[in-house]
Image (cartoon, rainbow, N blue to C red):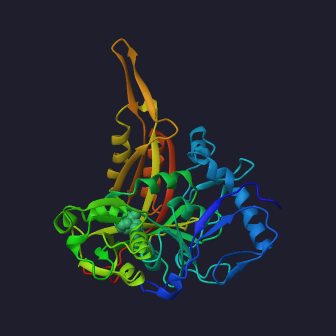
Amino acid sequence: MQAATSCDLKFRSTNLTANTARPTNAMSKRVLNVKCGYRSEPFSFRNGVSVSRADWQSSCAILSSKVASVEDPGGFAAVDAHKNGSVDLSLVPVETTTNGKLSQAQPLTITDLSPAPLHGSNLRVAYQGVPGAYSEAAAGKAYPNCEAIPCDQFDVAFQAVELWIADRAVLPVENSLGGSIHRNYDLLLRHRLHIVGEVQIPVHHCLLALPGVRTDCVSRVISHPQALAQTERSLDRLTPRAAREAFHDTAAAAEYISANGLHDTAAVASARAAELYSLQILADGIQDDTGNVTRFLMLAREPIIPRTDRPFKTSIVFAAQEHKGTSVLFKVLSAFAFRNISLTKIESRPHHNRPLRVVGDGSFGTAKNFEYMFYVDFEASMAETRAQNALSEVQEYTSFLRVLGSYPMDVTPWSMSPTEDA
Ligand SMILES: O=C(O)C(=O)C[C@]1(C(=O)O)C=C[C@@H](O)C=C1
């Protein structure tokens, strides 16, 4: 079979034991371009794991059956169908097959949160960044003993799971100081992965530089924009005259300084990044709040079966129906309030398919209202009747509704103190 599409994936591979450094393997990274196309050689994409042409072609076969949904700009096919009555609001999201028919995805069970993968090796977990990034630590917390697969962009991590290169992705969605990571909200909608869990990790930042460099000699600080935002006040104090520059991820910033021998530049990154890239720690614990926490989502190709024997959260995304007027958001939120369901998060993003709506009859001119997609997390499992009833009601006010996942809440206790997690 020849693949119907070609998709470049840039990723590196490392092994990861939960929250512990594996510097030697981690350092021997190879950046590879994965071309989904016809190859005459065995396809080798990871250290130590080679994939035969047959394996690769069968992955491509699966991929080509998924391409339609990946390329669907809003992933609207399945969800818009609920409006014409053809789809019941089900406990698990509904997938569309290539012939346009609706089929139930095969759900994972709760044990699939940390299972032995079908390919018989460690679970492969895609994250954005390079070894030493907080996302790598999050992957290790979510899936202990997983093989962490570094990806250079969030989008690549989504695709790695869709293409069966990875089994799961672990991606940040919000930080207690820096706020939402909007890109991942948009990608959740564009792709068809399911949220199967969440992990929160305390993020403990350090200021790193080459050995011998003094803080007052630093004229530039580089890091992930979230990390720069989380250390804004500390950097004002420590390096008031230094320029701040955004980098792909915290650990990549540390790696860059090390690889290029930059004596005038410091990075905001983890203590593990200092160790991996042979940098010294100029200042420790420089996050502007000691309780700096980032929440990551665990994503899989299939949803898990929601349960009621432990705290669950459900994430949905919806767009209001135009003709239902301005009180739609109020009505949607009351559907949860009246059933005593707590909301833990609400986020709005531009409605990419319909960003503007012209309102008014022209007598006083016309206004252009922005249209939004609303993302809501609530504390209930889709196995609970109250959650099902709330969503049936929400359906009445929305032109689009998708359940992104119903999954166990991260309730693990953690301390605010340094880096055992990060
Ligand atoms: O740059 C990293 O180390 C990341 O893992 C990314 C990221 C993010 O995107 O928010 C993760 C956790 C911290 O909040 C800072 C950065």
In this rendering, the answer to whether 27 lies above or below 346 is: below
- Whether 309 is drawn above or below 374: the answer is below
Q: Position of residue 45 (x, y in %)?
A: 66, 74
Kindly identify the residue that appears in the image at 35 percent across and 52 percent down. 346
- Please identify the quarter of the rendering in which residue 247 is found: bottom left
Q: Nearer the viewer, residue 74 or 90?
A: 74
Q: Quadrant of the C terminus?
A: bottom left
Q: Is residue 421 left or right of residue 97?
A: left
Q: Is residue 129 visible?
A: yes
Residue 340, percent across and down? Answer: 32, 56
| 100 and 15: which is toward the camera | 15
Is 298 above or below relative to 116? Answer: above
Tell me the quadrant of the picture where the N terminus can be found.
bottom right
Residue 86 at x, y percent in the picture = 63, 43
The structure residue drawn at horizontal position 61% and vertical position 48%, both measured from the top left corner, is 78
Q: Is residue 155 left or right of residue 36?
A: left
Q: On the rendered structure, is 381 left or right of 60?
A: left
Quadrant of the displayed image that contains ligand 1: bottom left
